[in-house]
Amino acid sequence: MATKQRDIAVSEFFLKNRHLLGFDSPRRALLTAVKEAVDNSLDACEEADVLPEIAVDLEQIADSRFRVTVTDNGPGIVKNQIPKIFAKLLYGSKFHRLRMSRGQQGIGISAAGMYGQLTTGAATRILSRIKGAKKAHAMAVQIDTKQNKPAILSDTEQDWQPAFQTVDAAGEPDGPLVVSKHGTSVSIELEAAYQRAKQSVDEFLKQCAIVNPHLTLHYRLALQTKAEAADGKSAPMTEPPPTTKSPKAKVKSVAPAPKPGVTTVTYQRAVKVMPKIPDEILPHPHGVELGLLMQMLKDTESRTVRSALAHDFSRVSDRTALDICSRAGIEPRTNPTRIAHRESEALYKAIQDTKLMRPPTDCLSPIGEAQILAGLQKEIAADFFTAVTREPAVYRGNPFQIEVGLAFARPQETEGVGADEPVRVLRFANRVPLLYQPGACAMTRAAIGVNWKSYGLSQPKDALPIGPVVVLMHLASVWVPFTSESKDAIASYAEIIDELTLGLQECGRRLAVFLHKRQRQLEAARKRSYIELYIPHLAIGLKDILDLTDKEEHKIVGNLKKMLEKTQLDV
Amino acid sequence: MPKPKTIPAAPVVVSKKTASQKIVTVAQEIHTDIVKKHRKPSMEFPIRSLRNVKYDVKRGHFEILGHTATRTLSYNTVKTFAQSMRLLATTKNDLLDKDDIAGKREVYYNSKSWGECRFEEQPESDTLLDDIEAMLAINREQLGYIPEERGGEVTGPLVVIDQDPATGRPIRIDCTKLGSGAWSIPSRVEHLRFEASKAKFILAIETSSLFQRLVHHRYYQNARCILISMSGVPTRACRRFIRRLADDQHLPVLAFTDGDPYGYCNIYRTLKVGSGQAAHINRFFCVPQAHYLGVTPQDIHDYELEDATHPLEEADIKRANDALKNDPFIKHHKEWQDALNHMLKLGVRVEQQAFAKHGLNFVLDTYLPDKLKKARFLP
């Protein structure tokens, strides 16, 4: 038996459990790869205070094989970080800190690369140029799945700069090519399947554009045409995302001529305001599990338990640390690395029993009501928009903030919305669209739990309300409580449900006001046209009886209209 | 036989010019409201229902009470208001001023040229015509509207002087010389005149089959009466004709209907005192000198008709109870209440033809002479 026991590399583990990371089907894999790359790009741009411009390029190379290329105008990545970021699981700047960001564990992008490597054998290709650098690094990396180590296949320097081509509604180039002095492009080949509609890459990107109104997003999808597929040949290589050798050269049109199977779209930014960069905070003791507590005590730089408590956690003063120690029956000057298992359990219990201030909440960066409105307005044709940003709140020691947006859409002009359809719910966590497992999500539950009938929408029992409405919900938190590692659904903490409910109700009340007013206006318009239909006949009758002139007849009509509209149609 | 009280017929003839002027006055008020007073115009109508009548015993008919309904121009009334104006205009310009006539159905079709203001169904125009008649207090016949239904038929010792519609030349009609037929009462009867009649009374009959039996056997010769067939509830023209004839010749009027609540409360009551629906014009269309001959509930016993009856239907019972509760005429006359209660107690109704049980001509050989001899009529 013993000979069969061996270490399992974390990468090997995830390879066998890839559904946990969102690679369970070819269709899902495509979305997850795009999602991880875009999340990374957005986080990188925002940290560097650069208004993000991102190009997503999906190219179908064979029946079930795609190349995903995501290019950004971010700060670029220094050379020796590139292999670790893209080919080592659990490497990242985001895991050991509590700060609101899109990615959390540092699994995503390297997992996408690993999935590609597993299914196609191709390496992850990276181009990255740092501001001020003369050249860009070009690397091809793979992951050693047994040791969770990057393997560099090639490493060269190239004259590359990210370039972006805006297209108009017809997909034709619109305006000059925009070239950035810095940025990163990552390209992954993977086994995948493309499908439109719900849970598609298209939907994901559109929602990204809604919830990141400061983002300009270019999307190009090149599917194999039937003829190409029948030939058994791969699609002809069109140039990868438009690039240019010289930043000064203004290339008018590098976008490929429209060909069957290729669609291009640009989501323009609506605001030029960068989101506030969230502050990093120390973990709040009430939000820390026993295992993490033990890990933190092991990793701390402090030499006593007392100072470890006071320095590595938020809302723990020196005095409070002493209280906790005495409550747990631990000598405050004990070396934290020597705290035994049993003692750490006592410590954990003492922490739970100690009253502490709530964690600071100013570390969150909500989207903001104005930005949510801007995002909804640019992507959804609607007659009414509203948005609510709630005050921050806390669940299990983690600060979080809820935002709700609502649009009463024009069904003819908006996809997926209808007067007889359930409302469309858009879910976001730290600005990332959530497309899978809506039924398991706290946001869906909160939307179902609200009594929409009192706001003018019909609602079947235990279901979403019916109507041409788009409801957007956003949870901003330093630690988003997903129900699984694939980050599909938010866990139903009572505090989160409560905040969602309050936000939805506020939007609902405003919707009710709008609907009521609209109803009255429609009624008034109907009445006005009805009145105006018959007034002339009344005048004709009087004219015939009294032998009036045309002028007198007009006066009757004019007076009556004024009279009736004033008294009958007050809205 | 009750001695006929002569009640002078109400002054009815309104000249076309007067009627036309009345329409102009209504329109002028509305026009003034709109252009001078800047207020919403309104029209006032007497309410036309049994609730708004009382039984005027002295005059002998249902007299309208003061309740009126005001139709002020508003979102809800604008269509009817416009239709009223157009109908008034048509009435004045096309009928009164041109001395023309129109049927109710023609009014409905005429409106089809009014575009969106047209009447969708004939009941709409009928109701509006009733409204206008009530508002102007002029019956629609005088406005030029002719009823569609037939006015009834007359036979007996009577000579009517009608006139040629084109030339105005008098035409003499002897109602004894119509062979096996009868003379139809025209829709307008105001111009008719009568030569002195030898008749002793007028007999108004509900069903035309019984009427024909009496005509066939020349009953009017022996009984010296004028026979009139009403065919159900008498039309306005029929009521007006009987009234003018009775007044002119000082004749008593007797009604002979089926013995059921409809015959009592609808046919006879309407003949005598008018209806709730036409409350505003009952004074023209009533025959206060009428009395009720039969068939009464008591007749069922007296003439052994028990096995020639039918059970009262639910509608009959409801009609009888309604009348006992709401009809001012029935409520005034104890005899009628007793008769209705008697019928309700028996739970049966009896038809005019039931006398055929004793032989086809029992009704004219025995029943009518017997009743006339006894002369105990219901009021």
Image (cartoon, helix red, strand yellow):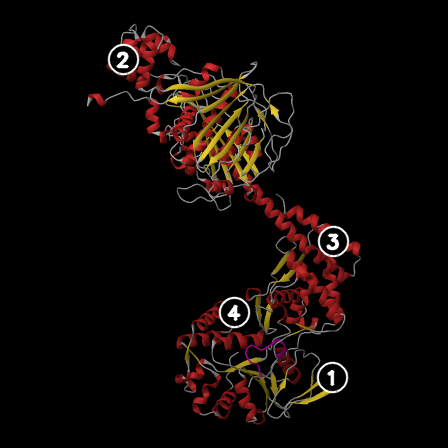
Which quarter of the figure is the N terminus of chain A placed in?
Answer: top left
Q: Chain of mark 1?
A: B
Counting from the top left corner in percent of width and height, residue A235 is at: 51, 36
Say which element carries label 4.
loop
Number of the label disc, if any, that sits on residue A544: none
Please name which of the two marks, 4 or 2, marks the residue nearer to the observer: 2
Amino acid at the residue labelled 4: Asp
Mark 4 or mark 1, which has the lower sequence index? 1
Q: Quadrant of residue A306?
A: top left
Residue A419 is inside the magenta segment? no
Comparing labels 2 and 3, the label whose residue is closer to the camera:
2
Q: Nearer the viewer, residue B364 or B83?
A: B83
> Residue A232 at x, y = what percent?
47, 39
- Marks 2 and 3 close (CB-CB < 8 Å): no
Residue B233, magenta (yes or no): yes
For disc 1, the neighbor class at 10 Å (few under 14, some 14 to 19, many from 20) is few
Helix, strand or loop at mark 3: helix
Of circles 1 and 2, the one toward us is 2
Label 2 amino acid? Ala
What amino acid does circle 3 point to?
Answer: Ile
Q: Which structural element holds mark 2? A: helix
The residue under label 4 is B327
Q: Secondary structure at mark 1?
A: loop
Q: Which residue is mark 2?
A: A328
Q: Which mark is residue B164?
A: 1
Please say if the residues under marks 4 and 2 sit with CB atoms less than 8 Å apart: no
Q: Is residue A127 left or right of residue B78?
A: left
Q: Chain of mark 3?
A: A
Question: Badge 3 is on which residue?
Answer: A556
The residue type indicated by label 1 comes to Asp
Is residue B155 shown above or below A84? below
